[in-house]
Amino acid sequence: MILESLRVATGVAVLSFTVSMPHAMNLAWAKQDRDARIKTSPQTAYPTLASWFGIEGYCEVHFAIDEEGFPFGVEPACTRKVFCFEAKRAVAGASFYPKLVDGMPTVRTNVVYPMQYYFEDSDYDVELDRNNLEPCENKAVS
């Protein structure tokens, strides 16, 4: 499911429901459920080191959105580590309209924001590069 430039991670169940009410009541009830949407898009910048050396890449930033519309648990995975800090900073600074269930704000998990870093005159192929994603932060193993 794509919401503006949001893409929900694969393997996530989509909420569906059936209601046996008069049409007008059904519409009023349905307006109370809504998935999260972007309010303020991430404001990213090309990392200076990457631009100096002509490095291009791709990131997928995984996160959740709290009841107030703020991202948390922001974890980027990038093709090149030079993009990790900027991708995380950009998504952490964005804001969202929270997910509504029965009219109540609720946490939205499994959200992915894709980011491409390339030069305008480049022949960069994100489809070839996207298979080389690596988590930006090493996780402790217990």
Image (spheres, grey):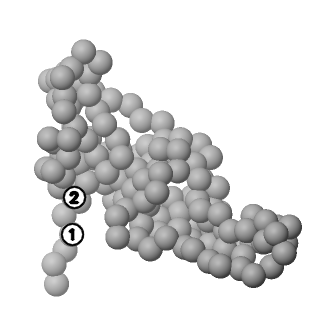
Q: Camera-side residue: 42 or 93?
A: 42
Q: Residue furthest bottom?
A: 142
Q: What element carries label 1?
A: loop
Horizontal side, residue 47 vs residue 107: left or right: left
Other residues around mark 2 within 10 Å, as few (<14) / some (14–19) / many (≥20)? some
Q: Camera-side residue: 109 or 27?
A: 27
Q: Give the residue at x 14% y 41%.
A: 128
Amino acid at dot 1: Lys
Q: Is mark 2 on a helix, strand or loop?
A: strand
Q: Give the residue at x 57% y 48%.
A: 38
Residue 22 x/y as whole percent: 84, 75
Other residues around mark 1 within 10 Å, as few (<14) / some (14–19) / many (≥20)? few
Q: Give the residue at x 21% y 69%.
A: 139
Q: Mark 2 points at which residue?
A: 135
Residue 82 is drawn in which quadrant?
top left
Q: Give the residue at x 37% y 62%.
A: 9
Q: Camera-side residue: 57 or 34?
A: 34
How far apart are labels 2 and 1 at the CA level? 9 Å
Whether residue 4 is visible: yes
Residue 123 x/y as whole percent: 18, 23
Residue 115 x/y as whole percent: 34, 41
The label shown at residue 32 is none
Identify whether 44 is placed above or below 132.
above
Identify whether 124 is placed above or below 71.
above
Identify whether 83 is placed above or below 26.
above
Horizontal side, residue 95 vs residue 138: left or right: right
Picture quarter with the C terminus:
bottom left
Residue 21 x/y as whole percent: 80, 79
Q: Name the residue under label 1.
A: 139
Whether residue 92 is visible: no
Q: Camera-side residue: 83 or 120?
A: 120
Confirm or deny contact between disc 2 and disc 1 (CB under 8 A).
yes
